[in-house]
Image (cartoon, helix red, strand yellow):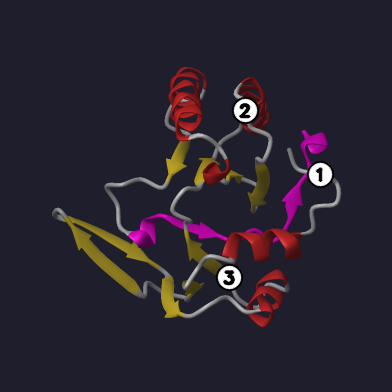
Amino acid sequence: MTSQSTSIEALLSRLTQESTSYYIEEKSISTRETIDGHTFYSRFKKYEGRVSQTLIAQHINKTITLAVPLEKDSLLFEYSGEHMVVFVNLLFHLAKEFGIDTLTITMYNFDKIIVYLPAFEYNSNIIEEFLEKVEKLLDLKLPEQWQILPRKNIPEIGNLLQLPREVIELDSF
């Protein structure tokens, strides 16, 4: 689970350390990509290179909004709805059952919460079982208010991790 000593700077450094590209949000749509007849639009413009400490500082200070492609073996659980406490408690309860203890909670505005899981730290069979159980329970309790990223059927611009500006401690719920 998140610890009291988790700083946003440390989290952002960890989330961006493997990225060889990053995205900055523009005021209007800057990217359009078509896959299998479906068109995806994004306000995030892609830049090649590593995320610098200067970019991280600008992001924290709300000068820019940064996003990075999801790491190959990472998962995001995203929820938009009224029952954030139910969502978070369900994820953390199931994670504990499976011996997963590195979930990080972040919030965007007041209507969207994201839980990040560095899946590469765990056995792939455990992650698959965990995902199956999470999907079944979320479908039952909170249908159509959540998603798990990355999704294989959408392009990179749809599987971005918009970087958080603060870490939420579990005690807040």
* In this rendering, position of residue 132 left or right of residue 97: left
Name the disc covering residue 65, or none: 3
Nearer to the camera, 4 or 139: 4
Considering only vertical position in the picture, is 114 above or below 133? Answer: below
Residue position marked by numbered label 2 in the rendering: 95
* Magenta part of the chain: 156-173
* Alpha-carbon span between mark 2 and mark 3: 30 Å
Position of the C terminus by quadrant: top right
* SS assignment at label 3: loop
* In this rendering, position of residue 123 left or right of residue 93: left
Q: Amino acid at mark 2?
A: Ala
Are there few (<14), some (14-19), or many (20+) residues within 10 Å of tag 1?
A: few
Could you say which quadrant of the image residue 105 lies in?
top right
Q: Seen from this angle, which residue lies furthest front?
A: 123
Nearer to the camera, 25 or 102: 102
Considering only vertical position in the picture, is 80 above or below 20? Answer: above
What residue lies at 65% left-to-right and 40% top-to-bottom?
103
* SS assignment at label 1: loop
Q: Position of residue 142 (x, y in %)?
A: 50, 25
Pair 3/1: label in front: 1
Q: Seen from this angle, which residue lies furthest left?
A: 37
What residue lies at 67% left-to-right and 40% top-to-bottom?
102
Q: Amino acid at mark 3?
A: Thr
Are there few (<14), some (14-19), or many (20+) residues within 10 Å of tag 3?
A: many
Q: Earlier in the sequence, mark 2 or mark 3?
A: 3
Are there few (<14), some (14-19), or many (20+) residues within 10 Å of tag 2?
A: many
